[in-house]
Amino acid sequence: MPIRIFRIPSGMTAFYDSFARKISRDESNPELFFIRLRSMLMLWTCTTIVMWIYVFYCATAWGLNYPVPWGGLIFTLIHCTVPLIFYYTQSFSVAGIALSLSGLCFQTLFCFYTGGVYSPAAIWLTFHPVILGFFGSTTLIVFQVLLNFSIVIGLYIAGKVGLLPVDILPPTYRDGMIISCYVLLDILIACFTVAAIRLNKEKNRELNDARELTENLLRILCHDINNPLLIIKNSSKHLTPEDLAANPKYADRIKRASNDIQDLTRSVSSWMAYKDGKITLQPTNVSVKEIVEHIHFSFEDKLKEKNLTLVCTAQDENLCITGDKTAVCYQLFSNLISNAIKFSFEHTTVELSFSENDRFIVAQVKDNGMGIKPELINRVFSPYAHTTMRGTNDEHGTGFGLPIVAALIQKMNGKITIANRAQLNQDERGTVVTVYLPKASC
C-alpha cells in the first residue's frame, strides 16, 4: 500500500467542508467547486496565521509608536474577511485578489521601513503570483506580476532618491526576519503546491468519470435500443389490416417496445441536461394531494398490468412541499413509483406515504418485491456505477432513474435514502425509498 506523506486529518477536512458549504450559498454546486473552496479556506488559514505572526513580530520589534505594526494590523484584519468577501461575491478571483493584496500591502509597508528592495521581507513579493495562479485567471497573474514589478521599481527609486525612512530594525530581529521568511515562504509554497496537486487529481477524476459516463450512454444507445427496434420491425410485418384483429399481441409488443425506447431516450436526455446545467427549477408550493392525483392518473394502467394495488396515505391531506412542480410530479415521484412497480411481485401492494417533521415532508415509497441488493445501496444513486436490475416480469431500465432523482432532490435542498426492507424488519420484503423535501405552508 502506498504511503501518503501528506494527509489532512479527517476532522479538519470535515470542518472545512462544512465551512465551505456555509459560504457557498448554493448546495447544488459541483463537488469540484467545494474541493477548490475548501482548499482556498485552508490556504487562507495558513496565510492568516503568517500575517498575525508578523503583526506581533512588528509590535515587538518597533513597539506601538511606529506605523508598521498598526498598518500590519489593519491589513491583517482585511485579510481575515476573505471568506466573507467570497460569501457575497461567490468569486474565487475576487477572494484571491483580496487575499493577495492585503498581504502585499503589509509586505510593501514593511519593506518601505526596512530598506526598500534590500528588506528581508522583499522576497515575499514573489509569492503573490502563486496565490492568484491558484485563485484567479491568467489575466490576474499578469496583473500581479506587473504590480510587483511596479512596487519593486518604486521602492528602488525611493531608496535611491532618499525617500525611505531610516531603517531602525534591530539586527537581531533582522536575522530572525530573514530566517522566518525563507522557512514560512517554503511552507506556504508547499501548501499551495499540494492543494494544486489535489485539485488536478480531482479534475482528472471528473474527466475519467465523464468519459466513463459517455461510454455508458453509447453502450445503452447502441445495445438497449436495438432490442425494442428489432421487436418493432419484426412485429410490424404482421400488422396488416386483415390480420390485426387476429394478432393483437403484435400491436401490444410494438406499444411496449416503443415505450421502452421513449423511456430510455427520456432518461438519457434528462441526465445529460442535468450534467450540462440546463435543468432550471422553479420553486413553488406543491401539495401532496396533487402528487397523489398525478400518480394515480399516470400509473393506473401499469398497476393493472401486474395486478398491483397502490395505497397512498398522508399524515395530513394539506401537506405541501417546496419544489419545482414538474420535477416533483413528473420526474421524482414518477421514477420512484415506476421502480416500485417494476420490482414488485404481482398481486402485491405499492405504498406511498407522506408525513412531516420540523423541516421536511417525509415521503416513503415501499414495494413488496425482491428488495434491493445490499451491495447496490451505496452505488444506486451514481450514474457511473452499473446498477441496472431486471424487474420481476423481466422489465429492464437504463440505470439513470435514481441518479436523476437524487440530483433533483439535491437541487431542491432535500435528501434521499434507500434500504432493503428485510434488513430493517425480517417480516417484510421489498425496497423502501425515503425522500426528504423542504416543507411549505399551503
Image (cartoon, helix red, strand yellow):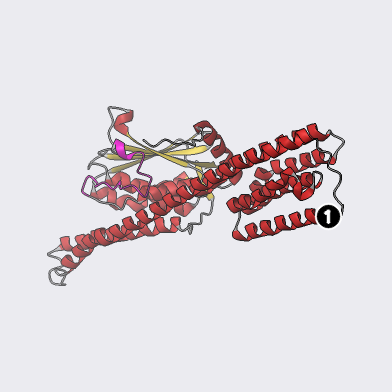
In the rendered image, residue 376 lying in the magenta stretch gets the answer yes
Vertical arrangement, residue 66 with respect to residue 266, above or below: above
In screen coordinates, is 179 left or right of 157? left
Q: How many marks?
A: 1
In the rendered image, residue 166 lying in the magenta stretch gets the answer no
Image spot of residue 285 (x, y percent): 53, 48
Toward the top, the furthest residue is 426
Vertical arrangement, residue 427 with respect to residue 129, above or below: above
Q: Nearer the viewer, residue 27 or 302?
A: 27
Quadrant the N terminus occupies: top left
For the stretch drawn in magenta, what is the main secondary structure?
loop
Span shown in magenta: 374-394
In screen coordinates, is 168 left or right of 430? right
Image spot of residue 395 (x, y percent): 24, 50
- Say whether residue 286 is visible: no
Residue topped by disc 1? 160
Q: Which of 264 and 318 is in front in this view?
A: 264
At a point 39% along the width and 48% down the height, the residue shown is 403
Quadrant the C terminus occupies: top right
Which secondary structure, mark 1?
helix
Identify residue type, mark 1. Lys
At a point 32% along the width and 48% down the height, the residue shown is 338
- Say whether residue 301 is visible: yes
In screen coordinates, is 143 left or right of 157? left
